[in-house]
Amino acid sequence: MNVDSWLKKARTRISALDAELLLLFVLQERDRIFLMTHLEMRLADADVLLLDKLIEMREQGMPLAYISGEKEFYGRVFQVNQHVLIPRPDSETIIDIAKRLDPRIFLGKVLDVGTGSGVLAITLSLEMPMARVSASDIERDALFVASKNAISLGARVDFLESNLLKRFPKDEKFDLIVANLPYVDIGWPWRSKELEWEPGSALYAGDGGTEIIKKFMTEAVGRTRYVILECDPCQHKTMIKFSKNLGFVHIETRGFQLVFSYKV
Ligand SMILES: C[S@@+](CC[C@H](N)C(=O)[O-])C[C@H]1O[C@@H](n2cnc3c(N)ncnc32)[C@H](O)[C@@H]1O
């Protein structure tokens, strides 16, 4: 079977884009142009068998990133598995905000709380090589993935297993803390089906999804000059009011992100 006939057959079962991405993954190629210029190329029987298995997994709803084991974030490829959330393009805004928030951050101390695959900490460290970047997560399996990503991408990040800020010394201060913690309410009717494949501990929180982020903001009082917090836009009003009562000044909302400053 050649590339052209495999793609035609696969498109009857999964989307055309997914079919192309699965084929590129098995052929260990990155560029979709490769497929268009190799339509006549014969596929090895072993590859066809493997592709059949992968299509089945995709048909069952497994996200492509878990099948391929990787996901691009801010132009770099990160390894992912089912212990970590698949990084979302929406979270790339956190990096853009951090880069233009305050020049002192480039030479300062940055912390990523709930690092998952490490995308935020690692990207911040690579985009701001002079900053000292730490990252924490409550899940050891996630920290393992994050550490592997830091090594393969050549980023210097200190990882710590911690429930929010509990294991950080009380007097340790940061210039910036970024946090993309669980904020999904299990009852939201618009939850997509693919979320079922991702770890619940990375997604769900009580109190309309705000339980963990409220705890985090409470612990961040007096510990950092800035906070960039991701949460759903339907939670923004609540979180701005809650954080204001703690002494944070809301300075910007951009996409899913809330930016706060605090006088330390
Ligand atoms: C929504 S995922 C985000 C992962 C990553 N920051 C990203 O943007 O792709 C949330 C992460 O927070 C971690 N987490 C959940 N509760 C936590 C807690 N109390 N303290 C620290 N990390 C926590 C989860 O294990 C998960 O890795």
Image: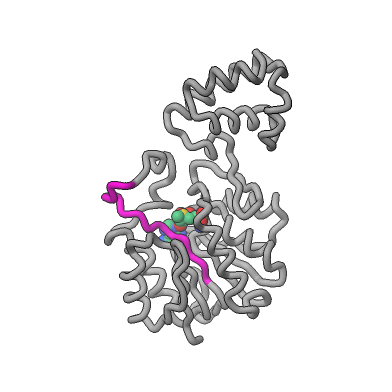
Q: Is residue 31 left or right of residue 206?
A: right
Q: Position of residue 79 (x, y in %)?
A: 61, 45
Q: Position of residue 1 (x, y in %)?
A: 65, 13
Examine the structure image and report whether residue 189 is included in the region drawn in magenta: yes
The residue range painted magenta reads 177-190
Examine the structure image and report whether residue 97 is included in the region drawn in magenta: no
Q: Is residue 150 left or right of residue 91?
A: right
Say whether residue 138 is visible: no
Q: 233 and 69: which one is in front?
A: 233
Q: Position of residue 173 (x, y in %)?
A: 54, 79
Count of marks, rendered view: 0
Q: Up-down: is 124 above or below 31?
A: below
Q: What residue lies at 48% left-to-right and 29% top-to-bottom?
A: 58
Q: Up-down: is 109 above or below 15?
A: below
Q: What residue lies at 59% left-to-right and 71% top-to-bottom?
A: 110
Q: Is residue 205 left or right of residue 43?
A: left
Q: Position of residue 113 (x, y in %)?
A: 50, 64
